[in-house]
Image (cartoon, rainbow, N blue to C red):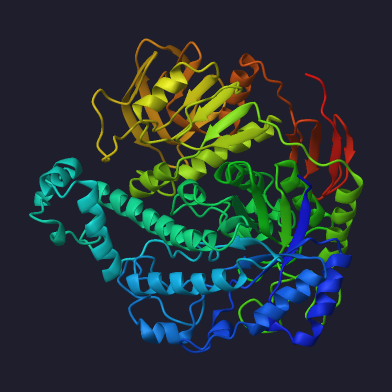
Amino acid sequence: MLRTLGTCYYPEHWPEDIWAEDARRMVEAGLTWVRIGEFAWSRLEPSPGDLQFEWLDRAIEVLGQAGLKVVLGTPTATPPRWMADRHPDMFAVDDQGRPRGFGSRRHYCFSHKGYFAESQRITRLFAERFGKNPHVAAWQTDNEYGCHDTIISYSEAARDGFRTWLQVQFNDDIAALNAAWGNVFWSMEYRAFDEIELPNLTVTEPNPAHVHAFRRFSSDQVVAFNRAQVEIIKDHSSAPISHNYMGRITDFDHFKTGDDLEIATWDSYPLGFLEDRVGASPEQQRAYARQGDPDFQALHHDLYRAVGKGRWWVMEQQPGPVNWAPYNPAPLSGMVRLWSWEAFAHGAEAVCYFRWRQAPFAQEQLHAGMLRPDSKDAPAMAEAMQVAAELKDTPDVQPAQAPVALMFDYDADWAWATQPQGQGLSYFGLIFDVYRALRRAGLSVDIVRPETRDFAGYKMVLVPGMMHMPDDLKQALAVSQAQVIYGPRSAARDASFNIPNPLPPALPGLDVTVSRLETIRPDMLRPLKEGGAAIHYVEELAGTGEPILRTNAGEVIAMRDGHQIYCGAWLDDDGFDMLLRQLAIEAGLTVRDLPEGIRVRQTATEEFWFNHTAAPVKTEVGLLPAAGVLRRPRPAC
């Protein structure tokens, strides 16, 4: 499949007499795709039932006649003002009981039945009108589910939906719910499902089983909302359907949402993310202020390749300064090209730049585009055109299975958020630290979903922090041919958030038991005899497995038996580097000592080298310039 470029366009923002010129310039720049429509509801239906679709007909025709393929977004992320008046209780409610208001976007609660029906209605109107349009070559449902903390809503609609959801989960047996949740503790037992409230506004912390169940319910509401749109579109169109996910948004299960879609896309903003969600130190933020974190985008590329079952895009690629982070620098010259090629190296089918022209009005007027507000080329244009020329003149990228698999489980993320046991600790943070260590060793990684049971072809499989592990997953890992690394907190809870007996992790073929656990202060790390240190979360282990990591005080924190290893501690960078490099070598993998900021990604036939630093770096393949990309044939093993 040929890799392509695109952009995000808002014809409703611009005079109609410039649409054709914009389309001509997009094609001239080497773009193939253009996404439109996802925020246009107020122009499509300015008042209830007053449908004004003709302008969108014309816009699609202009773009299509120029040779562009249209991705049409359903406009449900931005319900118009009259919708809020029609359904004044449709707004999401925060954990303090305060409803969101009108005047921005994503101002709806997924559980509100009235808005759910309205979203189906506008989607049906879209699908009926545009489903057979030859220029509409793909669809997007809504926009960025979960952005702005809009998944978990404590509304009356959510409360009512949660009660119904629990009745189904527990077969209308309130005694079974009380037993599963341990509600005998603190006299929390219920007599009926309609007594159950949402887990907020309690005097102290609510029951973790209650919280975790509400997180599962909230995710299921997103899946149902998305599925309703997909089913309608598929009744009228054979074009593939996507959704654009966001970086480090884990409040709903993207795998389950993606099961109803043909393509996963995500919105990549390396500089904004470095400042507001990577979790980088001030020193790292300064060093990579104009390049972005070397691993954050790659992790999401690999994650959404899994969510899309191999088919994925970058729907929004940062082209210049954004407007929403604590600090908003411009990308270093060459980074727009590097980010584009990094996505293609990880298997992206398309990279679309956000946005075509910078808006001179409203919330995003300081968000750069490919064009300035005066329609002159912005700095990103030249780099995008360079990528387009390179795509045309070089062989297509051929994906391949990586040698390393890293399991990612959204349910585990909710479990850690429900009971972190230490300030600032998160499942995503643990996964990211493990992923970074693998990348620092020069290894290519596949993210795999928690339902995976076939690990053929992988030499290493890592399952850190998956708090509930079904028995069949444990068995599949135990009989796999891969080097398997668990922990910490792997299999620490059952499906109802109880500590299981026998005690965790209870892994077949590996006799290890967590005899004690603790979380530790950032200034009280535990040095290891083998090098590095345990940080954040530490489990002391017992059993007949072979000890392979000990603290200086002699505490055993990692054990192995054959190809299975349980590491009961969150390690610092030196610790993870030491452990994972050693295990990778034992698994028959080649590891590298990469300079700071240099990363490597292997495809079926090639090897890509990326310099994420602001200076030239000498590597084993030569001098990589700042923000440089090297594409070369893959060396023979």
Coordinates of residue 615 in the picture (x, y in percent):
84, 47
Viewer can see residue 442: yes
The reply to whether residue 597 is visible in this rendering is: no
Tag count in the figure? 0
Residue 424, image x, y percentages: 44, 49
* 585, above or below 486, in the image: above
List x then y, in percent, for residue 629. Answer: 84, 44
In which quadrant is the C terminus drawn? top right
Along the line of sight, which residue is nearer the eye, 69 or 299?
Answer: 69
Residue at x 73%, y 55% (from the top left corner): 351
Name the residue nearer the viewer: 320 or 52: 52
Quarter location, residue 294? top right
| Residue located 75% across and 51% down the image | 339
Q: Which quarter of the rendering shows the N terminus?
A: top right
Q: Nearer the viewer, residue 399 or 318?
A: 399
422 displayed left or right of 584: left
Viewer-proximal residue among 552 and 405: 405
Residue 115 at what x, y percent from top left? 39, 73
Q: Quadrant of residue 328?
A: bottom right
